[in-house]
Amino acid sequence: MRDMEGKIALVAAGSKGLGRASALKMAMRGANVAICARDEAACAEAASDIAEQAGVETWYCAADVSTAEGVRKFVHGAAAHFGGVDVLVSNAGGPPRGVFEDFEDDAWFDAFELNVMSAVRLVRETLPHMRGRGGGRILFILSSSVREPIDDLLLSNVMRPAVAGLAKSLSRALGEEDILVNVVIPGVINTERARQGRASLAKQLGITFAESVARVEREVPLGRLGEPEEFGAMVAFLASPEASYISGGVFAVDGGRLKAI
């Protein structure tokens, strides 16, 4: 299905993991894709691979979306290259693990810049370009902490729901302009970062990596980890013409793991 031919999709933190999978799935639907990340070499490799697999045009730059300068560099560079923006996928790495006593003010401010202000700035810089195209899609990749707090991820538990609140507010404010806004949250997805986390946890607990994976799989009704491509498929669907009456939602791609309604 190539129902996104001619569309321009921007994916922050798109060189690996959920961002890369989302960019690839949109490209497979025909969208031209711009990605950014801090690592320029990783961006170049991902952009080249996506272009080769999907037969679309890609653009990339090294940018840190936790800074205003990084966001402007990415959004305006991509818009200048392609001539506009139709889809924004707001995405950024998570803050450090830890509980309340672990964090001083600097950690809170850093998490705010990384997760909340990156989203605010990406939308702010993208909207004029999107309005020039007569509408668009804004998608926020967040965390299951939007629905259920995670014990050792206090900063995420605070920052991610703030962005979900932003998304809901924007969905109401921008609907008349045909700009649809949604949130997509992952469960346990088999990304490189997640594998590193499970390896670290296994070492702490004195168990094997396989045992740490099995523990997580037992918490998922489908009995397995999700793959990045499965997550990316949801992002691409919400960015596509098929999702033309879906806005203001929070969509979990988690195999049924969340207990929250």
Image (spheres, rainbow, N blue to C red):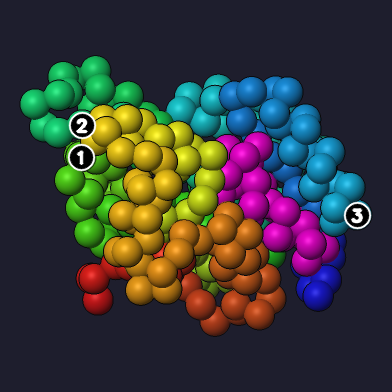
Q: Are marks 1 and 2 in contact (CB under 8 Å)?
A: yes
Quote the CA–CA distance across marks 1 and 2: 5 Å
Where is residue 204 shown, x and y percent of the image? 26, 30
Q: Which mark is residue 98?
A: 2
Q: Nearer the viewer, residue 20 or 68?
A: 20
Quote the CA–CA distance across marks 2 and 3: 42 Å
Q: Quadrant of the N terminus?
A: bottom right
Task: Judge the density around disc 1: few (<14), some (14-19), many (≥20) Cα neighbours within 10 Å.
Answer: few
Would you identify the image quadrant in which residue 55 lies? Answer: bottom right
Q: Is residue 108 above or below residue 106?
A: below
Q: Is residue 73 above or below residue 134?
A: above
Quote the CA–CA distance across marks 1 and 3: 42 Å
Q: Nearer the viewer, residue 94 or 167?
A: 94
Q: Which residue is mark 1?
A: 152
Where is residue 67 shown, x and y percent of the image? 48, 24
Q: Are marks 2 and 3 in contact (CB under 8 Å)?
A: no
Q: Which residues are magenta?
A: 7-30
Total numbered circles: 3
Secondary structure under the numbered disc 2 in the rendered image: loop
What amino acid type should be assigned to the residue bearing mark 2? Gly
Where is residue 260 shown, x and y percent of the image? 23, 71
Secondary structure under the numbered disc 1 in the rendered image: loop
Q: Which residue is mark 3?
A: 55
Q: Residue furthest left?
A: 101
Task: Judge the density around disc 3: few (<14), some (14-19), many (≥20) Cα neighbours within 10 Å.
Answer: some
- Work out whether mark 1 precedes mark 2 in sequence or the reverse, and give the earlier one: 2
Residue 8 on the magenta span = yes
Q: Residue at x 58, y 38 (%)?
A: 13
Q: Which mark is residue 111?
A: none
Secondary structure under the numbered disc 3 in the rendered image: loop
